[in-house]
């Protein structure tokens, strides 16, 4: 008999929990003066939907991200490493607020770290 291993997605409470974390995450981001300008004029409802799908997929959930490729979506934005780090910090804070276990947070942060080269476009080379 095969033992069922619970996904991180299921462990945190599935779609409702991911939606709550993403909503809090964007509250923190738009409240951050260094990040808020990146989100001016952005359709936040659509952005949050895409983010829920992406986080769900990263955490082993059934949703499949269907947004633009990350490099294309961020290509015109002057995102530096410190912006990326601040976004990760806000996501970690939101995950902590919802009592997500540290080992799950660590896996999410590791997955995010792999996206940094596609998102950070403005660091001096």
Image (cartoon, grey):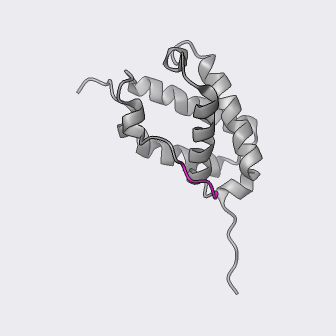
Magenta-colored stretch includes residue 120: no
Q: Nearer the viewer, residue 39 or 115?
A: 39
User: What residue lies at 70% left-to-right and 74% top-to-bottom?
Assistant: 4
Q: Position of residue 20 (x, y in %)?
A: 74, 37
Quadrant for the N terminus, please: bottom right
Residue 29 position by quadrant: top right
Q: Position of residue 74 (x, y in %)?
A: 40, 31
Figure quadrant of the C terminus: top left
> Along the line of sight, which residue is nearer the eye, 81 or 72?
72
Left or right: 102, with 117 as reference point: right
**Residue nearer the viewer, 9 or 106:** 9
Residue 98 position, x and y percent, is: 75, 39
Query: Is residue 118 depicted above or below 87 in this figure?
Result: below
The image quarter containing residue 99 is: top right
Query: Extreme bottom residue here?
Result: 1
At x 56%, y 51%, the residue is 58
User: Is the stretch drawn in magenta largely helix, strand or loop?
Assistant: loop
Tell whether 83 sits left or right of 33.
left
Magenta residues, as a range?
61-65
Q: Is residue 63 magenta?
A: yes
Q: Residue at x 31, y 25 (%)?
A: 123
Give the residue drawn at x 45%, y 42%.
Answer: 113
| Residue 34 position (above or below residue 62) | above
Q: Is residue 7 above or below residue 5?
A: above
């Amino acid at each position: 008999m095969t033992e069922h291993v619970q996904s991180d997605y299921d462990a945190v409470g599935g779609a409702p929990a991911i939606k709550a974390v993403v909503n809090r995450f964007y509250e923190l981001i738009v409240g951050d003066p260094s990040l808020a300008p990146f989100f001016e004029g952005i359709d936040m409802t659509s952005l949050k939907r895409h983010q829920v799908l992406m986080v769900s997929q990263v955490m082993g959930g059934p949703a499949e991200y269907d947004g633009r490729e990350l490099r294309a979506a961020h290509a015109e934005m002057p995102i530096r490493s410190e912006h990326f780090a601040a976004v990760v910090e806000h996501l970690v804070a939101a995950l902590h607020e919802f009592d997500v276990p540290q080992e799950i947070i660590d896996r999410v942060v590791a997955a995010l770290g792999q996206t940094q080269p596609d998102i950070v476009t403005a660091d001096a080379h």
